[in-house]
Image (cartoon, grey):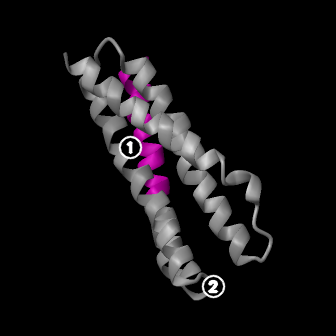
Amino acid sequence: MTSQILIATGALFGMLSVIFGAFGAHALKKILSTDQLHSFEVGVKYQMYHAIVLIALGYGQGPMSTAIYWCFVIGILLFSFSIYGLVLSDAKGKKLKFLGPITPLGGLLLVTGWLLVLVNAF
């Protein structure tokens, strides 16, 4: 995995998390319940945290960088984006329930990515 791909992916996810955060704070604030808005914000925060790690990983690659990259990228897509889908579909009255089981799979990949970061450190 090249450092450019790691940094570019982190930057893309970081940029999107700022856009989604602003969208949630302004446009969605009027249509989401407090609980729904909180869930949406959790997705945004986790996306940003992992975007930052991807950028850092690009500047200091180790032997497990590729595995960490894929755990974080797929984890963000499954975790954060399933939360966005659940919240937005619920707000429209047509909750996409099939996304519910996808969220924990994304979380498991994020945890696995962090475990690999730990292993990579040694």
Query: Where the C terminus falls, by quadrant?
Result: top left
Q: Position of residue 41 (x, y in %)?
A: 46, 67
N-terminal-most mark, 1 or 2: 2
Which quadrant of the view contains residue 28? bottom right
Which quadrant of the view contains residue 10? top left
Q: Which residue is mark 2?
A: 31
Q: Position of residue 106 (x, y in %)?
A: 54, 41
Residue 37 vertical position relative to residue 68 in the rendered view, above or below: below
Q: Amino acid at mark 2?
A: Ile
Instruction: Report the span colored magenta.
Output: 1-17
Q: Position of residue 97 (x, y in %)?
A: 75, 59
Q: Would residue 58 be seen by someone viewing this image from the given angle? A: no
In the foreground, 31 or 98: 98
Q: Which residue is mark 1?
A: 50
Question: For this view, does 114 lie left or right of residue 35?
Answer: left
Residue 39 vertical position relative to residue 80 in the rendered view, above or below: below
Q: Is residue 44 magenta?
A: no
In the foreground, 55 or 109: 109
User: Residue visible at 50% across and 55% down?
Assistant: 16
Packing grade of label 2 (10 A; few <14, some 14-19, many >=20) is some
User: Residue visible at 44% across and 53% down?
Assistant: 15
The Cα–Cα distance between marks 1 and 2, rounded to whole angstroms, is 28 Å
The dominant secondary structure in magenta is helix
